[in-house]
Amino acid sequence: MPVDLMPASADLIRLLPEIVLTLMGTLLMVLAAILRKRSSNAYGNLSIAALLAALGAAVYAYTRQGPAFGNMLVVDGLATFFRALVIVVGILTVLASYRFLRRQGAETGEYHALLLFSIAGQCLMAAANDLIVVFIGLEISSLASYVMVGYLRDDKRANEAALKYFLLGSFATAFFLYGVALVYGITGTINLSGVRAALTAPESCLQAGAGSVLCVQNWLAPWPIFLGVAAALLFVGLGFKVSAAPFQIWAPDVYQGAPSPVTAFLSTGPKAAAFAVFLRIFMSAFEPGGAAWEPLVWFSALASMTIGNFAALRQSNVKRMLAYSSIAHAGYVLVALTARSADGAAAVMFYLGAYAFMNIGAFAVVGHLAGKGERYQDIEDFGGLGQKQPLTAAMLTIFLLSLIGVPLTGGFFGKFYIFKAALESHLVWLTVLGLLNSAVAAYYYLRVLVMMYFREPSQAAIEAEPLRPGLRAALLVSAVATLFLGIFPNWVLDFSNKSAAMMK
Amino acid sequence: MGSVPISWFLTLSAVLFALGVAGFLFRRSIITVFMSIELMLNAVNLSFVTFSYQLKKVDGHLFSFFVMVVAAAEAAVGLAIILTVFRNRKTLNIDDVSSMKD
């Protein structure tokens, strides 16, 4: 039988963002080798062009929604939302990296290539509808980001961070993979739609390709237990990637040791992509078994919020403090997942959108102030920043207020939708404890604000160089987006509601 | 697989996986820790192939190839990272690589 190996053009269009990113990433690597020029702003410009092209491709793919490559990928609202989000995160990261890379005297060609590969992996995760595609996307994204964390080869802290991220990341991936294997054994498929079908009608027979019919046998009986184990293993793997408790141990060390722009990227891009997978697996494929995994997520949400916020209180290093805060934020998002409703899914999407901008902005300011070799990261170093650099301080204020969840910022509506969804699903205790947690969190964010505006200028604030155009653009875009989401939330919320409703 | 029951293969796979987890948690040499992760991945491969045989479907075999390819890529990146750590610190003991503290 002749086999048509050429994929249909509709399939290719639905994979276009990944294709663009991979080709451009490869091109960057080749260029860096051919031109023998290891650092140049041109590489950054080229990668921004690639990301803009990928963003266009993602939007174009949205006009041709549907499954691709035998239902291994699916382009729908959810996929498009997260693709666009991680690409925008990438653009902001590139903007924030220009000055940083030059100051450290780092090679830029490979850096941008790795960034593009990582984003390609995350786009693939966002659109994946098959557990093996999820796994491959996860690995493409992770392998590139392991290298990015250790990109400054001679920096001892960065080395250590890369090593920890690599070892714990691969450890988590192995758990995820074991979960995939069990799902395959139980349902006979790893296609997420297939898994859902198998779980909805476990007794009936599944259509397995060309006319043959495969019956799910109860040979793994009693298989609800194995199914629970499989779900738990998948949860462990993804929990590591989103730095949810009790799998958060790596996050503070990695976020502190990694170069600041990379930290900004890590705390938003891979996290958003992993939550996209979370939504697909737990809200769609495993949705029929919801009652079984809900307590697991409930516990993890509460533990992440509490551990993150209370540990952040004790930090004097701002980068490390923000790392703990990002654990807490993963907890808030998990609250929305615990709600197990379309509103909850929409809240997850909205929150991750708002969180991406405010967190990238905050880490970018930290990287800006830290100076060469990232010397200044302590809270005292923020003293007098409001006096020395009013614009930088004003924007950091916006990001921190949004992280607290003050009205008129994206963070406020993000939290509002999350806790609203949780209340509607009768998660009263989780909501109360979550709100108490946000009150605790306000303390350590406000401490930085007080430092900036009510203290004499520190050495770091005096030495800080003026904002360069790239970084300024990144901060302005993030600040404007944070305020925009806080004043006109409906724009994004409508889209996420629509996508969440389509997901089933 | 003849007369050996399926459950034996699955048990072996689970035991190998558990050994990998134990190695990861308790060994102190970075290289051994890394090898433990590889052991876990190969344990999963065994599961995939067993399930594939049981279900009379070929895709499980394909997944195990994907896993092998990814494991190879991971080894390349991982060994490079381990090498830079060794260059900077002259040690491969995991307890000596902890400069960041609360």
Image (tube, coloured by chain):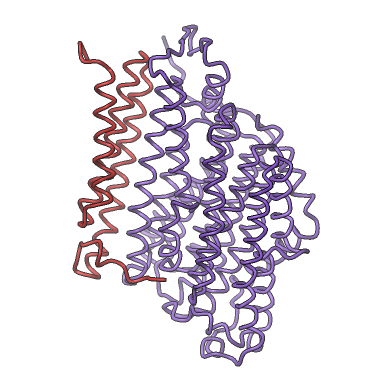
Q: Position of residue A43 (x, y in %)?
A: 48, 62
| A176 or B64: nearer the viewer | A176
**Quadrant of the image containing the C terminus of chain A:** top right
Q: Position of residue B79 (x, y in %)?
A: 25, 54
Q: Residue at x 69, y 47 (%)?
A: A428
Q: How many marks?
A: 0
**Quadrant of the image containing the N terminus of chain A:** top left
| A173 or A129: nearer the viewer | A173
Residue A387 appears in the picture as rendered = yes
Instruction: Name the image quarter holding residue B22.
Output: top left
| A248 or A458: nearer the viewer | A248
Instruction: Name the image quarter holding residue A105.
Output: bottom left
Left/right of residue A119 with respect to residue B85 in the rendered view: right
Q: Position of residue A78 (x, y in %)?
A: 64, 39
Colour that chain A carries in the picture:
purple
Left/right of residue A147 with respect to residue A470 in the rendered view: left
Above or below, A188 against A419 in this view is: above
Q: Residue at x 51, y 60 (%)?
A: A307
Chain letter of the red region: B
Above or below, A81 against A186 in this view is: below
Q: Position of residue A303 (x, y in %)?
A: 52, 53
Residue A9 appears in the picture as rendered = no
Q: Residue furthest front?
A: A429
